[in-house]
Amino acid sequence: MLAGAFVVASAAIPMLGSIYIVFMANMILMYVVLAIGLDILLGRAGQFAFAHTAFFGIGIYATSLVNIATGLPFYLTIPIGACIAGLVGALIALPATRLKHLYLGLATFAFAEVAQWVFNNWEEVTGGANGLRFQPSQTGFGEITNDLEAYPFVLAIAVFMVWITRNLELSKLGRSMEAIKESEHAATASGISVNRTKAIAFTISAVYAGVAGGMFTLFQSYVHPDVLGFDTLVLVLSMIVIGGIGTLPGVIVGVVLLGLLPEVMRGLESYQEFIYGIILIGVLMFMPRGIWGRVLSLRDSMGSRKPEGKITASQGEES
Amino acid sequence: MKSAKVTKSLVGLGLGLGMALAAGTATAYTVGNPQGKYQDPGISDTEIVIGLHAPLSGRAKAYGVDALDAAKMWYKMINDRGGIWGRKIRVVTADDKCSPNDLVAVVKKLVTVDKVFVVHGGSCTHATIAAQEYITREKVPMVMLNAAGDAGVFPPTRYMFGSFGGTQRTVGGSLIDFVTSKLGAKKIAYLAHDDDFGASNYLAAKWAADKNGVKIVEDQRVSRKIVDVTAPMLKVRASGADVLVITTYTGPAALAVKKAHEFGIKIPIVAAVQAVPNLNAFVKNVGTKDAFKSFYYGSPLNDLTDGPKQKWIIDMFKKNYPGRSPSPFMSYGVPSAMAIAQALHNAGPNPTRESFVDAMAALKFNTGILAGPIEFGENKRDGHNASIFLKYDGTNTSRVPGIFYNRMPAQ
């Protein structure tokens, strides 16, 4: 039923005939991949890390620079960009796995700040504070020159990444991440290599951010380091927390909601910040497991079946 | 087992999606814009639609609100006088938050949903240029509201006009014009930001210094976030410069003026407009009026922000928005609206976007607000190249006679 609605909605977007709507759809699909990547690290592996926008930036710059240098089709440049982001993620993971909680958060935040400094000052490569203009992505048969042409590819990548994530959460690795989040001691006692699993989670999360960066280059033509700052991190964090941290449908719901909300409220000018804040506080107060957590609770209370949420009692009010 | 089921479902979903998308995309390509009497959207027998955007929320709101309202005020005045060629101007406003992603969304909405004839907006250059590729591809004219950075107009592109307040090249070039012609400077110390902003004003300053046969003996670059300028100011003192030019934002500039006073640096200090957006606040940040014995600052306006030559526009704003006191950014919103109205008139009774762009490129007029004329050209998209300078002695502010220009050719 839901899948059918998704097919109809996805097909309807280009038919609406507005580039603005297609652009918003592309943005939301990109945020889906970016947020799922952060959720793997934060919601599933329980790692308090804040370098996600740095990996997103690495993905954007790497993908576009490879495109400029080689003219390779996007189905090669995006994986290259994602691999570079993943490689940097793996390097960061080595020291990061020795840190926990606030210290890990501070260390990864410091890395994000350093990365933004590099984006702002490595002018020969990133364009510095002037930003970087992209060349159109190549398909192998031509160029992607507008949102409409990019949309099918952006959608396909997003669906593919959701499918990968669904398989990941059902895999042994996914369950190891969950175990680490619950208790590192218990996970170790169960024979799980905690540091190795954390490092893999870091790397996978960075790859997702890199893929999202590559998707960005499909439908945007310019990046400025301002886009890769703290504001974007807070937005993505809000998406996963509001939607339902640690749950794939919840993250998607959060992305769609917080992706559309600013557009719906744009006409309210400065009142939108107030209303936005009220909505966030309201959701956090009355739905601490996020919107999806509330949906599951309601379904449970209606007696259909037991809750499936991955949230533990320590993260929510309901045990 | 469960995984296989999920995989099967997703493969089915993918196939369905693929077919639906193919149909959807094909339909979207075949639905064109209906061609009416007019070649371009946003124009009819009775109205012209202008998409006006600026940051109306968030941290950069101060740059946008009054400037946008000032532009609206100008369009209202045009309408009250009968419009342009019998058409009223209808303004559709939007909040771009000074964010590149938001601004692109806003511009795409204005063009494809609101179907405006011309986009008028942007208070932050880095956000505005994010839309440059789109408006160029779609051949939609875009006139920046009060964004004045160099990246929007260098290199010039056909459909984007701007820098009504002057680019950073104008800032750097006119500063050197002033210190050489009025202060007789031969050796200049230069304090700028270590980014594109600093690089752009230094480019024109260096060109003007070389042209005038004077030397920039000390070139210090600092971060926008700097909290202590002791090291660069010690170098300025040691340089033997006979004038200090500051092109940083207001925070570092206030630190530099304060430190110059502490170090007993007696040479004249000349600051760019971005250093002193509000004189009273700047003096308060420096902390002592004794630091202003020989202090000058530039402005792209034709007078002090509350001077007699600015009075007419301030009065007009107050009349249109009773109870509101305009910010120093208000006046910057009007010249771009004047340019659009003028170009719409010059483009004749049946303008197209292309004829409007040609009319914009041919514009040359005085605003009665800015120091110099607005002038574009076939290959020139920065509108304004002049500054005035004001002397502040700790008590009084007076205008230094003359208008000072950036004469560096566009590259």
Image (cartoon, coloured by chain):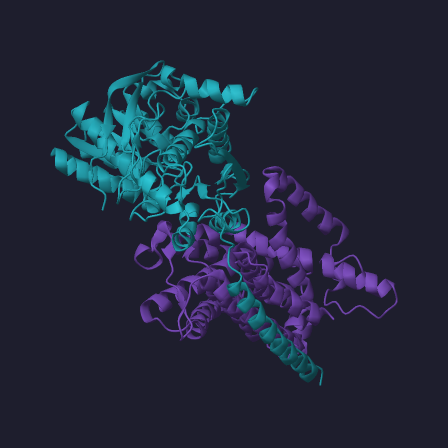
Chain colours: A purple, B cyan
- Where residue A242 sits, quadrant-wise, is bottom right
Rendered view: A3 above or below B102: below
Q: Can residue B222 be seen in this view?
A: no
B22 sits left or right of B211 in the view? right
Q: Nearer the viewer, residue B349 or A203?
A: B349
B1 sits left or right of A272 in the view? right
Percent across and percent down for residue B24 are: 58, 67
Q: Can residue B127 be seen in this view?
A: yes
Residue lying farthest to the front in this orientation = B37
Task: Give the quarter of the figure containing the N terminus of chain B.
Answer: bottom right
Rendered view: B294 above or below B28: above
Percent across and percent down for residue A316 are: 75, 58
Percent across and percent down for residue A208 are: 53, 68
Q: Which residue occupies 51% across, 49% down?
A: B102
Q: Which residue occupies 20% across, 35% down?
A: B407
Residue lying farthest to the right in this orientation = A303
Q: Which residue occupies 35% across, 71% down?
A: A71
- Where residue B280 sits, quadrant-wise, is top left
Percent across and percent down for residue B364 are: 29, 32
Q: Which of A89 and A264 is in front in this view?
A: A264
B356 sits left or right of B61 in the view? left
Total numbered labels placed on residues in the image: 0
Q: Nearer the viewer, residue B129 or B5?
A: B129
Rendered view: B219 above or below A129: above
